[in-house]
Amino acid sequence: MVTLIKNRKRCTKRISVIILVILFSGSVFNGSRMLAQEPGKTWVIVLDAGHGGKDPGAIGSIIMEKDINLAIALKTGEYLEQNVKNVKILYTRRNDSFPGLKERAEFANRNKADLFISIHANWSGAKSVRGAETFVMGLSKDEQNLQVAMKENEVILLEEDFSSKYQGFDPKSPESYIIFSLMQNVFREQSLDLASKVQSQFKNRTGRIDRGVKQNGFWVLYMTSMPSILIETGFITNPEEEKYLKSKTGQEYIASAIYRALRDYINEVDKKSYISTAADHLSEPETGSAGPSKPEQDSVPSGNNLFFMVQIASSTERKTLKPENFSGLDVVTELRSGNIFKYAAGSFITYSEAAEYRKKIESTYPGAFVIAVRDKQILPLQEAMESKD
């Protein structure tokens, strides 16, 4: 018992040091990157091919993970540069080199990246396990997911002076992962949205088995100061999937799916940014001395009427609709999109009213944006605005 208490004290002290270092370095909470893109701005996307050099990653019977990751990352970048005008693609590695996890994150932060995409192939002790999954930063609630994070984080043990570089973090100790529950990831909602798009492309366009969007304690995601995801493209330990991951066709299909998800995410954010900017020039809504309409309990969208709302959050886990879960907002609507639960506040007849309401709550929800809803289904915003004209 005495030994256990001492171990826990050491772990708590180590975690406290890590938190203090991160807070005062300012490398994670870069508030300027929380909001949507400025219209017309170039997106800086960092593609991270996992492992490399002396770190082969997972080893299959005919190929090593590091080679799969690099091929897919380079092909994804090629598709983006060929088909999306406003992007700048950077790579943490373009060859069989070995950048550390810390260096990968610092590279993205130093280049003020807008998105960080880490590409990997999975491993399992059971050859029958297969499918693709995408992770965002968070604390794992599943033992199997924790094992995935431990395996990916183990790479730090190959780095020189890893103990001081990672402030005593032990990738093999479950206690070390408590750190990921003590600090909130600022970009979680955006990361979830992007991860969901990747999984949708895997499932609907390339026919991959969808293992879903998950959260886990990956150090490389933890240290990046922008929306970040880690993609496990398939299981190298499954003979059929290993052949697919090694094949040129398989790599092209997977890269194409990732490219399309990124393209859709960029287009969506750019469209919101444009509309948000245009809203600043709209005439003030005629709401009298009371100001913008206040959301009422009986104003939740229903039927075929079109409403404008303000999306404030999204999550893979369902939240109870009570004020304390939404910073005191007493009227919040749940909208489901696949495996993602989206939460919106207010309901307004005009876009300008919703835009005004968004301004009122932006100090609490800086990433909030206006959406169009009919019968609890989210519609393309531009299309909805045009239909109102």
Image: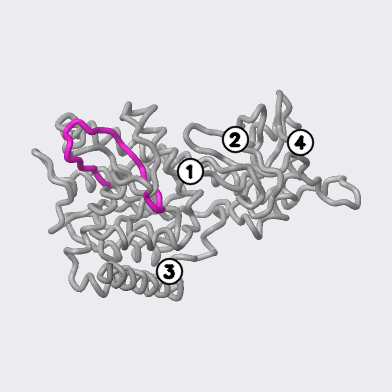
Q: Where is residue 302 in the image (x, y as percent from the top left)?
A: 71, 28
- Give whichever of discs 2 and 1 has the lower sequence position: 1
Q: Which mark is residue 193?
A: 1
> Which of 252 and 142 lies nearest the eye of the viewer?
142
- Circle 3 or circle 4, nearest the eye: 4
Q: Earlier in the sequence, mark 4 or mark 2?
A: 4
Q: Is residue 239 above or below residue 122?
A: above
Instruction: State which tag comes first along the sequence, 3 or 2.
Output: 3
Give the residue pinned by disc 2: 335
Q: How crowded is mark 1: few (under 14 residues within 10 Å), some or many (20 or more)?
A: many
- The residue beneath circle 3 is 27
Residue 100 seen in this snapshot: yes
Q: Mark 4 points at which residue?
A: 299
Amino acid type shown at disc 2:
Leu
**Circle 2: is it few (<14), some (14-19), or many (20+) Cα within 10 Å?**
some
Q: In which quarter of the image is residue 297?
A: top right
Horizontal and vertical percent position of residue 284: 82, 49
